[in-house]
Image: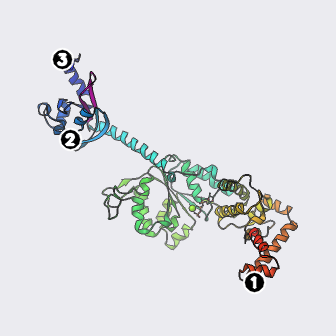
Amino acid sequence: MGCFGMKLPYEWLEEIISLSIERIVVVNHEGIIVYIDSGYCEFLGMSYEEAIGRPAQDVIMNTRMHIVAKTGKKELEDLQPINGSVMIANRYPIVINGELVGALGTVMFPDPDNLRHFKNKMNNLMEELNFYKNKAINELKSKYTFEDLVGKSPLFAAAKRMGEKVAGSDSSILITGESGTGKELFAHAIHHSSMRSHFPFVPVNCASIPESLFESEFFGYDEGAFTGAVKGGKEGFFKVADKGTIFLDEIGEMPLSMQSKLLRALQEKEIQPVGGQKAIPVDVRIIAATNRDLIQMVEDGSFRQDLYYRLNVINIELPPLRKRKEDIELIAKSLLHKLERKFYRNGTAISPEAIEKLAAHKWPGNVRELENVLERAINVVDGSEIQVSHLPLYIADQEVKRGDQDSNDSIAHKSSAAVVELLKDTIEKAEKKAILHALHVTDGNKLEAAKLLGIGKTKFYDKCKVFGI
Ligand SMILES: Nc1ncnc2c1ncn2[C@@H]1O[C@H](COP(=O)(O)OP(=O)(O)OP(=O)(O)O)[C@@H](O)[C@H]1O
Ligand SMILES: [Mg+2]
């Protein structure tokens, strides 16, 4: 005790150290063990006498005590495998009177309780790490919220309410609807307002994954699973999406063989990486989407019925745009606002007549088609208001029907106010028709067409541009 200059009796120190959950070793400047506690000796399977006075490297596997005794730099929470157990090691230089005289090492024993505690801590750390890693990968975040889903029509509002209601549950959701109705947007919004929002949102386009890669893409593979496998293996979508959401887009395009493998993973709630020894439990929420009629596909035998039921726990059906015409103006304005940012515009408006034309169209491509039409319009508009003439002919040319059963009252009302068309619109329409006819006659030859119409080629080209021909 005297040599350490301590005031406590040596036996006290021994007892204190043995009560602590850490085991302790002390080396001198040369890395020779000058103290080691009895619990540590027991773990190493040697007596105190056998350990003392020997270089640390000869006694403790993977030790760095001799290094810390030389560098004077502490090393904290290092993972150190000793005799088949991974220990948590801390190494501190010992400086007495300003002089580096040796090092103190502590290791935590893999006592079941400690280990569990530490494992939890490690798991949390890993989770946190993954969380930030995933946060950094923008792709894995949901990009839209329910606020981004524009629309007040009853059908759409009902779908939105449903989405909001079920976001908090873990049940699978199947979003159906025609192309461009906003299925992907919905999936983002659901994930965003779920408890899983801090974990990844992993969109997977089922149509674009070759059958041969299905398993490695979805379940990942272990290092060396096959030639060409990336070192360190690869995490599959399920692993990447752990605790988050997988969005299985275009699920109707998935071949039957893949459907079986997917179903198995969903049922077992675990995956087997290619070349992996053991199954890994996964915790993901599934949102699937399709514009196909899955019920019909189940009847045809091209979609597994059991998978259908597993995915279709909650169904959200998105209405086509033609069934929510009252939303068209709202959506158009919101899309214009979005497009303005893209094209560095400001204050672009859209005329009531143009809105009327938009409302009369059937929109087979739904909101995506509307977005394209408006992008084109914003490119050709000269002033700040989009007019009918800035719309593509197939939209500009259609009759605005009164009492169209699909259109809602407010639009119908506006239509009746415009029973008499402006002369300028009538003339434009006639001009367009004449140009199209001339082009038809000349098989698309513009110079010929201009000649037939008796106008100059510059004027002809100008008009074509305005009418979007
Ligand atoms: N309610 C909405 N409000 C605003 N924008 C919308 C709305 N619905 C869809 N969009 C826009 O329309 C486009 C198409 O949406 P999305 O990609 O979600 O459709 P989808 O149903 O997944 O189509 P597909 O079946 O072709 O994949 C997107 O650019 C989206 O921003
Ligand atoms: Mg989509």
State which tag comes first along the sequence, 1 or 2. 2
Q: Mark 2 falls on what kind of element?
A: loop
Task: Look at the image and tell me whether residue 138 can be seen.
Answer: yes
Q: Give whichever of 47, 255 is nearer the camera.
A: 47
Q: Quadrant of the N terminus?
A: top left
Q: Give whichever of 295, 371 is nearer the camera.
A: 371
Q: Give whichever of 330, 176 is nearer the camera.
A: 330
Q: What residue type is labelled 3?
A: Gly
| Drawn side of residue 354 relative to residue 37, left or right | right
| Drawn side of residue 97 relative to residue 366, left or right | left
| Vertical placement of residue 234 versus 112, above or below | below
Q: Mark 3 falls on what kind of element?
A: helix
The image quarter containing residue 92 is top left
State which tag comes first along the sequence, 1 or 3. 3
| Vertical placement of residue 356 versus 147, above or below | below
Q: Is mark 3 within 8 Å of ligand 1?
A: no
What residue range appears in magenta? 92-108
Residue plotted at (61% across, 50% down): 146
The image quarter containing residue 9 is top left
Q: Is residue 100 magenta?
A: yes
Residue denoted by label 1: 441
Q: Where is residue 463 in the image (x, y as percent from the top left)?
A: 78, 71
Q: Where is residue 309 in the image (x, y as percent from the top left)?
A: 50, 61
Residue denoted by label 3: 2
Image disc number at residue 61: 2
Q: Mark 1 falls on what kind of element?
A: helix
Is there CB contact under 8 Å for labels 1 and 2? no
In whole angstroms, how far apart are the C-alphas of marks 1 and 2? 90 Å
Q: Is residue 33 magenta?
A: no
Q: Give whichever of 177, 217 is nearer the camera.
A: 217
